[in-house]
Amino acid sequence: MNTIKTLIQNICPQAVFSEGEKPVPEVELTPRELADLLLPLREEKGLQFDYLEDLIGMDFGEQLGVIYRLYSTVNKHWVVLVCKAESREHPTLPTLSHLWAIADFYEREVFDFFGILFIGHPDMRRLFLRQDWTGYPLRKDYDASSDLNPLRLEAEPMRDDTDAVIRKEDGETAEEKHVVFDKDEYVVNIGPQHPATHGVLHFQVSLEGEIVKKVDVHCGYIHRGIEKMCESLTYPQTLAMTDRLDYLSAHQNRHALCACIEEAMGLEIPTRALYIRTLMDELSRIQSHLLFYATFCMDLGALTPFFYGFRDREMILNIFEDTTGGRLIQNYNVIGGVSRDLHPDFVEKTGQFIRYLPKVLKEYRQVFTDNVIFRQRTKGIGLLSAGQAVSYGVSGPTARASGVACDIRKRMPYAAYEEVSFREVLHTEGDALARYLVRMEEIEESLAIIDQLLTKLPAGEYCAKTKPVVKLPEGRFFKSVENARGEFGVFIESRGDKYPYRLKFHPPCLPLVSLVNPLASGNKIADLITIGASLDYVVPDIDR
């Protein structure tokens, strides 16, 4: 920490470091200081913060600003930067998009909800809300009831049909109008209602023959304002929101929020509860990867494996239902542990499942993985280098398929992961085939983890006692877990109340969907379907 502090102060002598002991150094900078520091942060030896973990828009009260979480994959350390815009009426900050590719989407999100303009950003459009939406919903002074129009749109709303595209007309520049396509480009729409988009997601695809030139991603069709809703919910009430994000990682997402709250409270969790959470997390990972297998096969035209994946996933859902009462939405993790103990048949049924699945995984390989057509459709398609994966903020199986070791279970062990041994699955090819193989091999590793946990499962309490009203001390808290698609993080700013002042979810799927354009460009339109399936994003996690 002292080394990082010294290096930053050499560049920005006026930088203010937070007082008190913190696990990650936090420094407050002016916009000018931030602009001076960006390139050295990214490139200078001793710093080399090459991974933009998150970019959190904030309404601090009198000022608007951003909290940046940066990680160095080289030196294995973090830093948090806090930068406030000088004007609340016309807030501006320097862009990071020229150094970290994912900043393109992250800054558009902050502009969408806070109205902060990032100077130098190449495409400062809203990302989730319509372009003619008025106001910025995550500002504290935003009043949804003050406008006579319930949708808060301009008097003459924009066209909202699927043929409408933003085109550059003669004489216009990018600064005068946000340019997506030139007027003579051939553009087709895929989605928002299309099985291959894996949810309500809209791609506008520019084609030259069968070759993809550009994909413009339109998000927000199922945006529900979850982060805004959490500001008026007590901490126990916020837990239900996590199940509605990546619903295939409901256990893991809720685990992250509980762990963040518990760490802020200084609450010690019973050992049995930690083991139960880890068991449920790994079962969730397997059922999610089984669904990935099923839908990936279907997208490529193989229907029989689709039924295999759903057949075997049902066994896990039955195990969930016995203990939690739910199959998709779980409501099981609570502050302090879990809401009820394991079902009496849990150990027996889970043991039967982990002995059954390895046998059918051999069938998966025979029927689909080793199929020559599948190999030709995926090998060398959608190439993602390790450097690109880091720049785009990608985590999870997609990053590991490009050789990036990023598993939170290994990097920052939590729950009972220090009590088990497993391999972090890595491939280096970075193509659609590698992304598929990583997930299939992770199923085998999860089975091994579950086997070890069942052997060591301790007796005891399954939940710690907490006060009826949960209040967190003032401060900023961040916790992340490894869900089925990558790093799912939770940021909480507390002002000492029973409600969070700001609760921000870090979704692994937003970086994944940001990859669609760079990976699909130059490939055939049929390969766009393969690439999207191999990324395995879940749309509610993107939109929130």
Image (spheres, grey):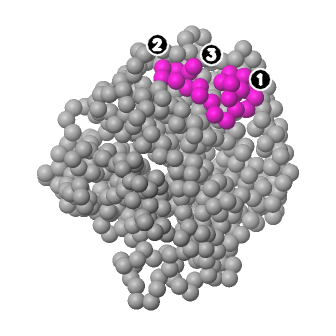
Left or right: residue 169 compared with residue 56:
right
- Measure the alpha-carbon separation of dots 1 and 2: 29 Å
Q: Residue at x 61, y 77 (%)?
A: 187
Instruction: Give the residue type that dot 2 points to.
Output: Lys
- Measure the alpha-carbon separation of dots 3 and 1: 15 Å
Residue 511 is situated, as x and y percent measured from the top left of the image, at 51, 55
Q: Residues within 10 Å of mark 2 (few under 14, many from 20)?
A: few
Instruction: Give the residue type that dot 3 points to.
Output: Asp
414 vs 488, nearest the viewer: 488
Task: Give the mark nearest the N terminus, 1 or 2.
Answer: 1
Q: Secondary structure at mark 2?
A: loop
Task: Give the mark nearest the N terminus, 3 or 1.
Answer: 3
- Measure the alpha-carbon separation of dots 2 and 3: 15 Å
Q: Which residue is situated farthest in the bottom direction here?
A: 170
Residue 192 is situated, as x and y percent measured from the top left of the image, at 63, 61
Q: Is residue 216 visible?
A: yes
Residue under numbered circle 1: 349
Residue 155 is situated, as x and y percent measured from the top left of the image, at 43, 66
Q: Residue at x 65, y 67 (%)?
A: 190
Placement of 171 over or under 476, stated as above or below: below
Q: Secondary structure at mark 3?
A: loop
Q: How many marks?
A: 3
Instruction: Give the residue type that dot 1 points to.
Output: Lys
Q: Which mark is residue 465?
A: 2
- Choose mark 3 or mark 1, whichever is in front: 3
User: Which quarter of the image is occupied by the N terminus?
Assistant: top left
Q: Which residues are magenta?
A: 316-339
Residue under numbered circle 3: 341
Q: Which residue is situated farthest in the left direction here?
A: 14
Left or right: residue 14 compared with residue 35:
left
